[in-house]
Image (cartoon, helix red, strand yellow):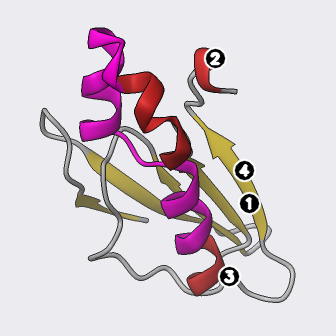
Amino acid sequence: MYCTEIPHSVYNVLYVVEIIKSGKKFIYACDTVSLNHITAKEMDYYFLEANHSEADYDIVAEQSNAIQAVSTHLSKENSYNFFMRNKGENSVYVPLHQRIEFK
């Protein structure tokens, strides 16, 4: 297991864990605006923040409480792109921290 810092409005880390008994590996990353500096190849599970859609930016401009969300949280598109760049043949994507008003 290891952790590394990820960008957010406060100190935050992601975790990469391997469960020894099963050999399963996963990454857990939530409350971040970017995973561009991270490589996590062929994990079994990708638990990744998918907070808002980039198409929601117009809605966000009208909601002051949502402005911070898009500036400090990972978009659905960036989350899924990270998964697609790193996944293995049988990897599972599990989106986290989705904003209700943007579903």
Q: Residues within 10 Å of mark 1 (few under 14, many from 20)?
A: some
Distance from disc 1 to disc 2, alpha carbons, whole Å, reads 19 Å
Would you name the residue on which mark 3 appears?
87
First in residue order: circle 3 vs circle 4? 3
Q: Are marks 1 and 4 in contact (CB under 8 Å)?
A: yes
Is disc 1 placed on a helix, strand or loop?
strand
Mark 4: secondary structure = strand
Q: Are marks 1 and 3 in contact (CB under 8 Å)?
A: yes
Does label 1 or label 3 sit earlier along the sequence?
3
| Amino acid type at mark 2 | Ile
What amino acid does circle 4 point to?
Val
- Amino acid carrying label 1: it is Tyr
| Residue 63 lies in the magenta-colored region | yes
Q: Say which of 37 and 66 sits in front.
A: 66
Of all residues, the one furthest to the right in this rendering is: 90
Is 42 placed above or below 17 here? below
Q: Which region shows up in magenta?
A: 61-82
User: Mark 1 against mark 2, which lies toward the viewer?
Assistant: 2
Tell me how far mark 1 sits from mark 3, CA to CA.
9 Å
Residue at left offset 58%, top offset 84%: 86
Please indicate whether residue 50 sits to the left or right of residue 21 in the image. left
- Where residue 93 is drawn, which disc sits there? 1
Look at the numbered discs 3 and 2 and tell me whether their residues touch, using CB distance below 8 Å.
no
The amino acid type of the residue labelled 3 equals Lys
Position of residue 91 measured from the top left corner of the image (x, y, whole percent) = 78, 74
